[in-house]
Amino acid sequence: MTSTRLEFDLDRSSPVPLYFQVAEQISEAIRTGELTPGSRLDNEILLADRLGLSRPTIRQAIQYLVDKGLLVRKRGVGTQVVHGQVKRSVELTSLYDDLRRAGQDPATRVLSIGTAAADETVAGVLAVPIGTEVLHLERLRFAAGEPLALLRNWLPLGLAPLTADALTERGLYELLRSAGVRMRVANQRIGARAASPAEARLLGERRGAPLLTMVRTTYDDQGRAVEHGSHAYRASHYSLEVTLIER
Amino acid sequence: MTSTRLEFDLDRSSPVPLYFQVAEQISEAIRTGELTPGSRLDNEILLADRLGLSRPTIRQAIQYLVDKGLLVRKRGVGTQVVHGQVKRSVELTSLYDDLRRAGQDPATRVLSIGTAAADETVAGVLAVPIGTEVLHLERLRFAAGEPLALLRNWLPLGLAPLTADALTERGLYELLRSAGVRMRVANQRIGARAASPAEARLLGERRGAPLLTMVRTTYDDQGRAVEHGSHAYRASHYSLEVTLIER
DNA sequence: CGGGGTAAATTGTCTTGACATTCTGACCTC
DNA sequence: GAGGTCAGAATGTCAAGACAATTTACCCCG
C-alpha cells in the first residue's frame, strides 16, 4: 500500500501559520477523496523533509486534525485517515444558525424584551447578585412558516445592543458574535416534558404534547457567563444533534 | 497581583510524561483553590526555568488544560484560570457510568439478547450489508429501584463476549472497554416523543407521557462503528447534560 | 510448524534556540 | 487633557536534534 503523493502549496510569506496551511491541505485531500479512509499518511519525518518543514510543524498540523477527528495516530504504526464519515459539528451552534444552514428559512417573533431583576436561578448562573437588572428576552421561532420553539433568555446588561428589530432579523448568537462576544463553552441540560396550555397555544400543539427542553448557559473565553437560556422545542418538528470526541 | 508560588513534584523516572505531571498539578491547584479563578499563571519562560523544564514542555501542559477549558491564554497578556466553574464532562459516558457516579445504584434487566438481521437503518450506521447478522440487545435500566430507561442496541458480532449475566452486572460501555474496544467518537440525536402503551407499561408511566429519546452511534479510534443504540428515558426522571468547548 | 526473541519503523517526549505577533501601559506631543 | 507612539512583556510559530516507547514483521530455534 503506497501512500498518495500529496502536493502542497506553502506560502511562507502568508500570515497563515505553516502548520495550518498543511492541515488545511490534508483536510482538503480527505474531503476530495484524494486521501481515502484507512489510507496511511507518509511518516512525519518524510513529510517534513519533503515539505521543507521541521517535524514539530508537521506534528502540529497532524495533531490539529487528530483533535478534529479526521486522523488517527498510533505509535509504531503511523497516521491514518479515519474510516467512515462521522458528522463533525462540534461547533457552538444556535438554533438560528442551524436552521439557516439547513435552508429552513427561520423567522422570529419577539414576544417581549426588557430588563428584569435576576431571580436566584438566573443570578446563580450569570454570577451576579440576586436582584441585579438583567436583559430578558422571549422569542417565538418559526421555520418554514411553522412555530418551532419558544425561547427565553437572560443576559447581562451592556453586552450587545439588542433590539426587537435586530432580533427579528438575526439570531441571538449572531448578534452577540458581531458585538465582539467570544463564546467558547456551553453547558446544556436537555430534557423533555409535556406542554403547558400556554406553550401549546403558542406552538400550535395540543395540550400535553411532548416538548424537548434545553437549558443552556454559555460562557466566553474568560469563563464569564454571557447568556442563559431556557428553551422548549416541538418534539414533533425538531431534535438536537451532538457529537462527542474523546481525546 | 503577584502570582502564587506553586510547588511542583516532578518525577523524571516516572513513565508519566512530564508535561502531564505539570498539567495534573496545575489542575489540582485549581481544584483546591490554590489558584483562584482569574489569577494569572507565571509566564511560560519563568515557569520552565523554575521547574527545570523546557518551554515547549510547559506549553504542552498548558495547552492540555486550555483544551479542557480550565485555562485561557492570550498573546501578549498571559495565562489565566477561567472564571466560574463550568462543569467539565466532555467524556464519552454511558448511562450506567453516570448513574453509578451519582450514587444512584443502577440495575439492569435484560429483556432480550440475540442475533438479528440488520435492517436498512442499522446496516447503514454500522456499515455492514443489509441482512448481516448483528447482535441485538433490549434492556430495561433501573435507578434507585425505579425503571428509568428502555435501551435497545445493535452491535457488530464478535466485538466482545456479551452475555445476559454480564449485562445484568455491568454497563455496556464498561464491557466493551474491558474487551479492548476503544470508543472515541459518538454521534447523538436527541429528541422527545410520547410513550407508546408498551413503553409506558415497561417504564411505569402513563400512556402518552413524554419520553426523552436518544439515538446514538459510537465509533472507535479507527472510525468504525462499534455500537448503535436507540434509547428512551423517562423525562420525569432523567435529563442529559452536554458541555461543548469551542476551540 | 509454532513460538519467542529481535530488529526496524514510527510516533511520543523533551531540549535548546530564535524570531514574530499581539497586547498593555507609559510616555510624549499637540 | 486627549490622543498617538513606542517599548516591554507575554504568547505564537518554527527549526533541528536526541532519545524513549510501542507496534509490527521477520527470523531463528526448538
Image (cartoon, coloured by chain):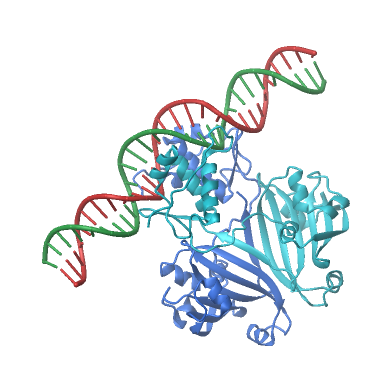
Chain colours: A cyan, B blue, C red, D green
Residue depicted at x 63% and y 62%: A242
Please say whether residue A9 is visible from this viewpoint.
yes
Residue depicted at x 58% and y 59%: B89
Residue depicted at x 66% and y 57%: A187
Number of marks in the rendered image: 0
Q: Position of residue B150 (x, y in %)?
A: 60, 79
**Left or right: B32 as drawn, with respect to B55:** right
Quadrant that contains the N terminus of chain A: bottom left
Occupied quadrant, residue A93: bottom right
Occupied quadrant, residue A47: top left
Q: Position of residue A181 (x, y in %)?
A: 72, 45
The answer to which of A33 and A99 lies nearer the viewer is: A33
Q: Position of residue A200 (x, y in %)?
A: 84, 73
Q: Position of residue A81 (x, y in %)?
A: 47, 57
**Left or right: B151 as drawn, with respect to B49:** right
The answer to which of B178 and B152 lies nearer the viewer is: B152
Please say whether residue B22 is visible from this viewpoint.
no
Residue depicted at x 65% and y 64%: A241
**Left or right: A84 as drawn, with respect to D20:** right
The answer to which of A134 and A218 lies nearer the viewer is: A218
